Image (cartoon, grey):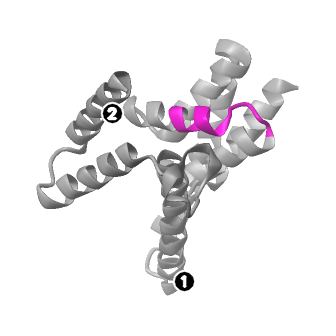
Amino acid sequence: MTMLQLFWSFFQIGMFSIGGGMAAMPLIQNQVVDLHNWLTLTEFTDLITIAEMTPGPIAINSATFVGIRIAGVPGALIATLGCILPSCIIVSLLAWVYFKYKELTLIQGILEGLRPAVVALIASAGLSIFTLAIWGKGGFSINVQSINYISLLLFSVAVFILRKWKPNPVFVMVGSGIIGGTVYLLM
């Protein structure tokens, strides 16, 4: 039954995560944390961090990680298959439809209508991770004593550096990780 749940959960994620890995984060969180309690919210945040750092799509990396955690290598294979199967089917059908009807204004309207939804999904995922990083497990609070000022400072500096000098984001992530690890080890 667990294998079927893994397959079905990640099949749904693969089916409805239009817009890529960032847009899939709320869907993954809903399935993995909220519905099945396979991971805690803290473990989910760690999962997203690891999935972002490793090569490959976030949803597939997440499926593989959760599958291994729940049912070993067979679980990883089943979860990953569940995640990629909808994409294979949908992309094949969409490619056929697009090439056949790409001049229709209806198709162009559908694509324009999907853009705001994708932005909303990405913003939702980013806000969840930001809230967890700054306020911890308790979530957003007006109490200024619950704010993690080190995380807030690292976030602010990283955004400033990325906007002002536009360096490779990998270097900013590595630098933030080193600084954050050093600060927390010294505390």
Q: Nearer the viewer, residue 90 or 97?
A: 90
Q: Residue at x 44, y 46 (%)?
A: 148
Q: Residue at x 26, y 32 (%)?
A: 179
| Residue type, numbered disc 2 | Gly
Going by the picture, which residue comes out furthest to the right?
A: 1
- Quarter the N terminus occupies: top right
Q: Residue at x 20, y 60 (%)?
A: 163
Going by the picture, which residue comes out furthest to the left?
A: 165
Q: Magenta segment range? A: 36-46
User: Can residue 92 be seen?
Assistant: no
Percent of width and height locating residue 124? 55, 61
- Quarter the C terminus occupies: top left
User: Can residue 61 be seen?
Assistant: yes
Q: Nearer the viewer, residue 139 or 86?
A: 139
- Residue 41 against residue 141 in the figure, above or below: above
Percent of width and height locating residue 116? 50, 74
| Residue type, numbered disc 1 | Leu
Q: Nearer the viewer, residue 109 or 183?
A: 183
Label 1 neighbour load within 10 Å: few <14, some 14-19, many 20+ = few
Res. 180 mark: 2
Name the residue tied to disc 1: 106
Q: Nearer the viewer, residue 96 or 172?
A: 172
Q: Is residue 108 left or right of residue 171?
A: right
* Local SS, label 1: helix
Percent of width and height locating residue 174? 26, 33
Separation of marks 2 and 1 at Cα, in angstroms: 49 Å
Res. 187 mark: none
> Looking at the rendering, which quadrant does residue 43 occupy?
top right
Label 2 neighbour load within 10 Å: few <14, some 14-19, many 20+ = some
Q: Report if residue 23 lies within the magenta region.
A: no
Looking at the image, is mark 2 or mark 1 earlier in the sequence?
1
